[in-house]
Image (cartoon, helix red, strand yellow):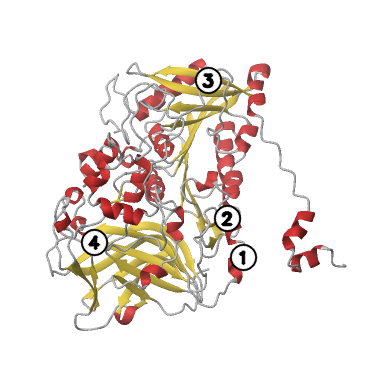
Amino acid sequence: MKPTVLLPCALSLLSLACQAQTPAPATPAPYDLKANYTKYEFRVPVRDGKKLFTVVYVPKDAEASGKRYPFLMTRTPYSCGPYGVDRYGSRFAPSEDFLKAGYIFVCQDVRGRFMSEGVYQEMAPIKTGKGPRDADASTDMHDTVQWLLDHVKGHNGKLGIWGISYPGFYTSTAIIDSHPAIKAASPQAPIADYFHRDDGYHGGAVMLAHNYGFLTGFKPQDNPTVEPKRWASFDYNSKDAYDYFLKLGNLDNIAKSIGKDRNPYFDELIENDRYNDYWKARSVGPHLKNIKAAVLTVGGWFDAEDLSGALATYQFIEKQNPGISNALVMGPWVHGGWVRNVGKGLGAVDFGSKTSEHFQKQILLPFFEQHLRGGSDAKLPEASIFETGTNVWRQYSAWPPVEAKPRALYLQAGGKLGWTAPAAGKAEFDSYVSDPNKPVPFIGYTSLGMPQEYMVADQRFAATRPDVLVYQTEVLEEDVTVAGPVSPRLFVSTSGTDADWVVKLIDVYPPDLGEEPMRNREQIADVPPPPGFQLGGYQQLVRGDPLRGRFRKSFEKPEAMVPGQVEEIRFDIPDVAHTFRRGHRIMVQIQSSWFPLIDRNPQSFVQIRSAKPEDFKVATQKVFHWKDQPSAVQLRVIEGGR
């Protein structure tokens, strides 16, 4: 075949001009929602007399031809607007495919938000003893489902519910002692426990940048109200969150900076600085019982907000509801990226395909079609897992997979990391000086808030700091596939009375990759990488999390560390599904600050939120690695890779 004119164009320095000669594909017209659906607005009464604002979109042919459609519902604190029966929105549907398939879509403002009556509470507590007028998120859903069945025409008697993030939490609460009409539920990035590795705290440390960014906009409302139509932009009067928060000082000062009226949600967050009754009442996992619906829990490996929530929700449902259909999907996504982005890349990392499209068309739609409309068997496995590194979807009969066996990567002298425990017969350790007034940043560039890219960000900037310990394997001769939780087990001491221990698992790329893999990086990434980086030698963060030393024995009863005393600390950080490819290295970094992703530990055993400048003390941290104190990171490894 003779070459076409595209070849010289591809080689030409005037490639942009050549591209302009090729007509762009026609963009399909957007789905005409108004032409196909009729919008209704209702105020649904629930058992304590409050009325919840509920929007319903009914297919027009249900009214004209008598067809019957299933309900698909979402409950949200973020508004079911635009309000008014003549004003149509589309955020209630997971994708356009659902609109075309035909459902009766329902969106409800949760209690105390926007147009619904009642008092709103952050992560509203689940009541364990319920009288006939005791209401919570679970009973609100139960009462709403019955009202819809009784008052909306054209349905087939089946209802599904879905939602992302906070609506994911409300999806979970909706299926506690679930109404029998709820046949399918998909909690996506659901909050499971705000204190334990979801939005609020990780390892006892406040997720500062995220919560501040969120709670400068999400505030109490006088309801019913249609305002605010959009959150006001908060003026940091700075371009660098690191400098901004460092100047503010302690958490009390940071809380005051939100505005003259502060924000009670932020105040409650920092006041409840241990796992107390406030948090226990808001932990949804123990209540996920008596579920009658099929469940599909969805999460993202790079969800900086609720990665753990998806994993915990799946596990609680699995343990407490034997025999039901309970499946898990984990893809290479940021928070909600499976709906909001194409899922082809993040920062410098390319995932090789449009992973979100695969999920929407091959998993989510077939799941609801099967359980709500009696469609064909979706044939979903227990766990549909995207494995980063190799960029393939895997199917498992359980998560973590039974194929993954426990192994330990041991810290060794000279910054080495290996599968063999150290043999040294005398105490060996590495040490560093941690200064809370010069904390280790969590990204190597200036930014406000919490960039989603941080979860795959290059860690070379941290590896060169004297207050970061670095351990790495030799160049891998075979692939190493890690699937499941990552569990540091460290023998440590501090010269202070408190310390944070941040452990990061990192994939080190070969140094000779050059520039070729960087082609079109801006185009493939949902969130582009920062400028000026090289992929050769890239230190990709795979997973990282802290443990605040005062919580090493209990998150309920903090306890000071004893200066100079060596202690073993164990903790879990969120699961991974990642293959370290041959030619790469595995690296572990250990540090005592990660700012302003988490708040600063003053390294003295004081009340952190009100710590005074003199409480922030320099401390020497030691990590031991010898025969009797073999510090390691425990993993689950699928032997032989793939």
Relative horizontal placement of residue 81, taking residue 199 as reference (left or right): right
Q: Are marks 1 and 3 in contact (CB under 8 Å)?
A: no
Q: Looking at the image, tell me whether mark 2 or mark 3 is earlier in sequence order.
A: 3
Which disc is residue 519 wearing? 1
How far apart marks 4 and 1 lie (CA) works out to 39 Å
Mark in front: 4 vs 1: 4
In the displayed structure, 229 sits above or below 576; it is above
> Along the line of sight, which residue is nearer the eye, 269 or 246?
246
Q: Looking at the image, tell me whether mark 4 or mark 1 is earlier in sequence order.
A: 4
How packed mark 2 is, by other alpha carbons closer than 10 Å (few <14, some 14-19, many 20 or more), is many
Q: Looking at the image, tell me whether mark 4 or mark 2 is earlier in sequence order.
A: 2
Secondary element at image label 1: loop
Mark in front: 4 vs 3: 4
Mark 3, residue position: 84
Q: Amino acid at mark 3?
A: Gly
In the displayed structure, 190 sits above or below 70; it is below
> Along the line of sight, which residue is nearer the eye, 291 or 109?
109
Residue at screen point 54% across, 44% down: 340
Mark 4, residue position: 436
